[in-house]
Image: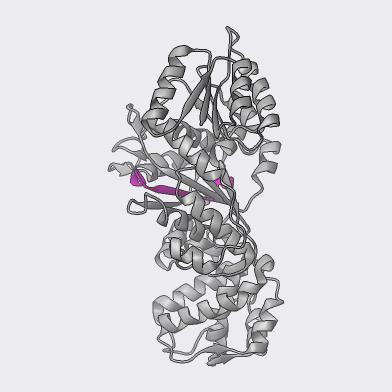
């Protein structure tokens, strides 16, 4: 049963009719007193709560009753709904335990979507689920791991993927946040629509609107042709906003509008366009701390993290290292057409005790670098130690593989990887060292499938 609490009889009738038409049972109350009587009879599964029950339009009545409601039925999701929409009010409600916030007049489809999402995300997660069972229900291709930590994340990803809820993925650099974002898309109802990846750390403030929303010919100097923005390209699909913590405050304001209203304006165009996208964001930064310092907008923070997924570091899932090593070895065999390549048991144990600050990405690069340097078919501890010693050494002809061992493109890729590691992912220093512009470096990273290396400087 869904309980609708609103002092307007027309609103009660409208929402209850919508709910009944879509298979839900609804009951209505005009004020907290009536609502409490209904709750005594039967505990609702969800509450739609108006923010005001009199001529007072401050919203304090709704907020006060929300606190009372959460004290009585803490696990019941509450969707706030009000004609006096304000972001500070929405944030205050969410802080007090509300699931989400919708303003009047609402769109029926949007309200139904929020209800469905609330039901899905407030289900009790299963304990002790196995990887085999998860793989039978979802497509988790390329996500390697069988530890309890990774199984918990995958279980959440599976549940979240069924909804259109905005997701914030947190984790250290190199933990594979993009892979998990793609898994959410692949297991959603939008899987046949575009999955558009945007690295916000690689977009300057001056180009933000053009890149994200597009521009028309003549909108600014050098705008010689119309250009579609990333949101338009992602329409009906999913947009993945990586490095959201790198976005400057001015750009945050521009992004907030499209996330709230699902509308945007192409640069140089006066009309407003609508867009239907699922938004997934990721960062390795502490956004809560940034909100407190005033470097990240609080309203944007609460708009992007209806659900938060924390990706464990490799240190937290050491039991997965043998599986990851085997996966990267098989990848090497496939890419370079190798017949036999292996890692000794002693070396596997040794790798499990290494602190990989770059996480899975660093482990992957170590495997590849060890093969390039050693030239062996079976890696021992000494081979990995030698490769690690050369991680931060300048690139020279002595570090390069034998002539004919790699194609020119493969050598270029390895050179970029080595330089990125040498400068700890600093894009400006890496580009300068390679004699490239930042834009040219980004193009090469995309070309070689190394876009996950792009990170905050």
Q: Is residue 243 magenta?
A: yes
* Residue at the extreme top: 55
User: As drawn, is 436 to the left or to the right of 237?
Assistant: right
Near-viewer residue (62 or 282): 62
Question: Splitting the image into 4 quarters, where does residue 149 fall?
Answer: bottom right
Q: Which residue lies at the image location 51% right of the left edge and 58% below the top edge?
A: 180
**Image location (x, y in percent) of residue 17:** 39, 23
Residue 365 seen in render: no
Where is residue 431? Give x, y as percent. Answer: 52, 62
Name which residue lies at 64% across and 27% down.
Answer: 92
Q: Quadrant of the C terminus?
A: bottom right
Q: In this view, does 3 lie to the left or right of 354?
A: left
Start and end of the magenta stretch? 233-246
Q: Is residue 25 above or below residue 367?
A: above
Residue 388 at what x, y percent from top left? 65, 79
Q: In this view, does 243 lie above or below 312?
A: above
Q: Is residue 200 magenta?
A: no
Instruction: Give the residue displayed 57% in from the left and 84% down from the top.
Output: 370
Q: On the image, which quarter does residue 354 sit in? A: bottom right
Please state which of residues 144 and 46 is positioned toward the viewer in this rendering: 46
Q: State left or right for residue 50 relative to residue 333.
A: right
The one nearer the camera, 318 or 263, is: 318
Residue 209 seen from this side:
yes
Q: How many marks?
A: 0
Q: Name the colouring of the figure.
A: one colour
Left or right placement of residue 269 versus residue 442 in this view: left
Residue 454, percent from left and from top:
53, 59
């Amino acid at each position: 049963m869904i309980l609708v609490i609103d002092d307007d009889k027309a609103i009660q009738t409208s929402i209850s009719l919508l709910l009944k038409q879509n298979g839900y049972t609804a009951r209505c109350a005009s004020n907290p007193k009536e609502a409490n009587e209904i709750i005594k009879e039967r505990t609702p599964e969800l509450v739609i709560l108006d923010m005001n029950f009199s001529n007072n339009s401050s919203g304090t009545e709704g907020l006060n009753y929300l606190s009372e409601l959460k004290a009585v039925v803490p696990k019941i999701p509450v969707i706030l709904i009000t004609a006096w929409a304000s972001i500070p009010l929405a944030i205050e409600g969410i802080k007090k335990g509300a699931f989400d916030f919708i303003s009047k007049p609402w769109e029926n489809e949007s309200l139904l979507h929020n209800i469905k999402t609330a039901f899905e995300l407030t289900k009790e997660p299963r304990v002790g689920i196995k990887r085999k069972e998860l793989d039978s229900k979802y497509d988790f291709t390329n996500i390697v791991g069988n530890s309890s930590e990774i199984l918990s994340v995958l279980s959440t990803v599976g549940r979240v993927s069924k909804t259109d809820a905005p997701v914030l993925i947190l984790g250290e650099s190199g933990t594979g946040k993009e892979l998990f974002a793609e898994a959410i898309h692949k297991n959603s109802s939008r899987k046949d629509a575009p999955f558009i990846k945007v690295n916000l750390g690689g977009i300057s403030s001056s180009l933000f609107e053009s890149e994200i929303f597009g521009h028309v010919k003549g909108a600014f100097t050098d705008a010689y042709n119309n250009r579609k923005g990333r949101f338009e390209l992602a329409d009906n699909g999913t947009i993945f906003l990586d490095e959201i913590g790198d976005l400057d405050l001015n750009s945050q304001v521009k992004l907030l509008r499209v996330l709230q209203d699902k509308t945007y304006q192409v640069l140089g165009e006066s009309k407003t366009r609508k867009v239907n996208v699922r938004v997934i964001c990721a960062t390795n930064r502490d956004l809560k701390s940034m909100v407190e310092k005033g470097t990240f907008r609080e309203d944007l923070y609460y708009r992007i993290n209806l659900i938060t997924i924390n990706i464990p570091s490799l240190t937290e899932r050491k039991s997965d290292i043998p599986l990851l090593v085997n996966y990267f070895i098989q990848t090497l065999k496939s890419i370079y057409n190798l017949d036999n390549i292996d890692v000794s048991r002693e070396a596997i144990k040794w790798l499990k005790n290494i602190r990989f600050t770059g996480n899975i990405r660093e482990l992957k690069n170590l495997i590849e670098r060890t093969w390039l340097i050693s030239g062996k078919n079976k890696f021992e501890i000494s081979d990995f130690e030698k490769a690690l010693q050369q991680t931060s050494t300048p690139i020279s002809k002595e570090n390069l593989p034998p002539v004919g061992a790699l194609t020119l493109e493969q050598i270029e890729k390895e050179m970029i990887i080595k330089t990125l590691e040498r400068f700890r992912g600093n894009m400006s220093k890496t580009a300068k060292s390679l004699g490239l512009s930042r834009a040219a470096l980004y193009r090469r990273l995309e070309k070689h499938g190394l876009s996950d290396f792009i990170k905050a400087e």
